[in-house]
Amino acid sequence: MKLLRKLRTLFRKEKLDAEMAEEMRHHVELQMELNRKAGIDPDEARYAALRQFGNVASVQEQAREGRGWVWLEHSIKDFRLAVRQLAKFPGFSVVTVLTLALGIGASTAIYSVVHALLVTPLRYHEAGQIVQLRSRQKEGEISDVAPATFGDLYAGNAAFAALAAQYYYYVNLTGTDTPSLLTSADVTADFFRLFAVAPLRGRTWSAEDLRPGAPPVVVLGHSLWRSQFDGRDSIIGQQIMLDETAFTVIGVMPESFKDPAGVGQLWRPMRPGVDDFTNRSSRYWTIFGRLRTGVTLERANVELASFSQQLVQAHPRNYEGWSVEAVDLRSQLVGDYRTGLLVVLGAVGCVMLITCANVTGLSLVRAAARRKELAIRMALGSSRGRLVGLILTENLLLALLGGGGGVLLGGWGLGALLASLPDGWLPRAEEVSLNLPVLGASLALTLLSGLASGLAPGLTASRVNANDAIKDGTRGSAGPSAARLRATLIVVEIALALVLLTGTGLLGRSFLGLLQRKPGVDTGRLLSLTVSLSAKRYDTAYKRWAFFSHAETEVAAVPGVEAAGFSQTPPFRWGIPVGFVPVRAEGAANATNLPEAYSDAVSVDYFRAVGCPLRAGRLFTPADDTKSPAVVILSQAAARVYFGAENPLGRFITSGEQTRFEVVGVVGDVRRAGLASDIPLQVYRPLAQHPPPFGTLMVHTALPPATLAKSVEAALWRVDASTPVSDVATMDTYVNRSVMQPRFYLVLFGLFAVFALLLAGIGLYGLVAYSVAQRTCEFGIRTALGASPLDVLVPVMREGAKLVGFGLVLGLAGSFATAQLLQNMVYETSLHDPAVFLVVPLVLAVVTAVACYLPARRATKIDPLVALRAE
């Protein structure tokens, strides 16, 4: 009775932790020994004692239920016990928390990007009603819209409440401490009305500002207002010098407003009669529309299809094979990032599943080690629900700790990810952050992880048999159901790891293939600089050409410069698409369905500077000036498309203008849109015949290009000190930026795949090691009976090999099925590349074989005496 009162007192004080459970078990066993000497059956004695304790617990539970506090008391008690348990086993706790933190951190960082780009609405009023209009060719080529097309749309349409157009233009800001090259978004009248945005200061333009001959006005972007004018309110009404022309500042836009592409730093109004509204051959205007109330995107496209047919009938030469379509603005801005980001999100989801599987496996082992404690708790009156709740509480606590660490890791990883990307490369990058929706998603993922990793161990542990659990010599065994569950989890981990590794292999093969593509120019020693000329001082073609010619001469004289040449548009950055058509022998243009070509004006030494080889005919000479016939040089792709197998030299092309251009040469192709793009058509015109108000200087050097940047800038300023020089970078920089997207996906997939491989290897190692520990006695007896180390090693390796085999089979099936998701992310590589699907499973098999071998090798070194003594 004294012993019973002591146990009741311990139970009543609610100090039943693992140590107390062991003490109770000791006292129960002592009572059993006394009963055995008295001739009472041991099992009956054990259960009689436990029933006594259970009755005491039942009375206490009923008393608490009468007060209505049982749930709260249980929760507090479970939480306290969970804290003590986790503190008692720091190794298990730290490993679990770190595993969850890495998985949740990766998920948080990636979801932050996905949420900003694909979920968060654009920062415009009723952004869902705003669309972008674009031209589409039957062959699939997509471009912007010609100015005259916008005029036809604006004249009459039933689908849009407002239409606006914009195009970007370089302008020089002078009158400040340092001349600056700015990007102006020249827009039509309804631009700000379409986006329903009011200025932060001042106003936008009125009808009076839009008439031809009206004084020039400008609206500043918020960042330009802050950086160049110190955010002064007094700037409203003042004049600033743009291209040496005085523009009156009439407004400043709020910080939250940017043009959809986020490029424009200021806005100027386009005016009929001043800007070209009649051009039908060049598709370079970006058109936005706001749908009328009740008009869907599908209905708008039906009307645009009818409109396109009218254009074809009225102007077949310019519109044959082309149509105008409307697309959701956010979809247009995100473009091909949507598929890639969703695939990356799926990859991080696989990592999270592997993480939960690993933590579940650890929890199963931990629950098996506590079988005796849990058995006594059940015998003392705890229900299965209480035991499941206890283990769930521990796992939720671990998940919350891991989730907190994951948010910190996610914030750090997100910052590192964004810092590694070039400015302007990722659309809406300024909106990517760990905001409340992202943190809410992380919390939900944390709770789901805790529940997913704790439910199975809790249910398994709650099925404990009290009789078996407290027998002498019985090890903490999880039982066959828990063993099967752990094995299943390992198979799933291996399969998911193989899917990620296969995706990484395909992306890696594709990326290596991209790097082997020839850009078409010698990028190794090439420096690129952009200059913009004042429209007022360089108001004639002769003055602009004089500047370019003089600047070339000055730069070519800089020590270390081997060649220098100007182009109107810089390769690997942007270009001007123009529709050219060949002229037949009788003189009529052949209006076939042809893709647009990049039109570029280049100087005489340009091809030598960039290393673009001559394939046929001749290059430009100083004689190709305004007094000579209009001539062009075609790229190989353009010559092939325009003239097929015929000799293009001496033939003519036209762009819808009255001028016909004679083809005098053919040069190599340049992947000017990037290594990941197809080879475009290219038409070069002599810079002397078509000198633009801005240009990009390409400098081929004998020294590292970056070391000559200051010297080249100084040479340009010797020609004109007021001309801004910007975008100074090596051509390798732009070429590498053109493959930034596939590199981005490859790095992320690679990190996730390595993490998945590591977790799968650790999980398999833990499973085999646990199996070896459970079979220590068996291996000791085998060794004592003369079994060789190989006889012990093979069964253990066979057990792991079965799991690996099942995982590889499932993983290969999943890899074949999911490879189609990478279709838009893989270049010049088969989605079922044999090398990838052979090498990757082999690598995974080797890693998992090592994970099996290490604990199996330890089994061969078991000392029989030590093993039997431990039993």
Image: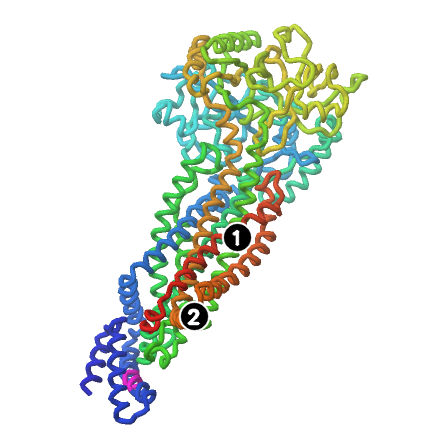
Tell me whether circle 1 and circle 2 mark residues in contact (CB < 8 Å): no
Task: Categorize mark 2 by other alpha carbons within 10 Å: few (<14), some (14-19), many (20+).
Answer: few
Q: What residue did someone put label 1 on?
A: 498
Q: Position of residue 637 (x, y in %)?
A: 68, 26
Residue depicted at 53% across the width and 41% down the height: 508
Q: Is residue 356 visible?
A: no
Identify residue type, mark 1: Leu
Q: In the image shown, does 324 or 170 lie closer to the viewer?
A: 170
Which range is magenta?
A: 49-54
Query: Which picture quadrant has residue 173?
Result: top left
Q: In the image shown, does 759 or 328 lie closer to the viewer?
A: 759
Q: Position of residue 611 (x, y in %)?
A: 57, 19
Q: Is residue 417 magenta?
A: no
Which one is closest to the eye, mark 1 or mark 2?
2
Find the distance from the CA under tag 1 to the CA under tag 2. Answer: 40 Å
Q: Is residue 585 left or right of residue 11?
A: right
Which quadrant is the C terminus positioned in?
Answer: bottom left
**Seen from this angle, which residue lies furthest left?**
2
Q: What residue did someone put label 2 on?
A: 786
Q: Is residue 67 left or right of residue 523?
A: left
**Seen from this angle, which residue lies furthest right?**
586
Q: Is residue 12 visible?
A: yes
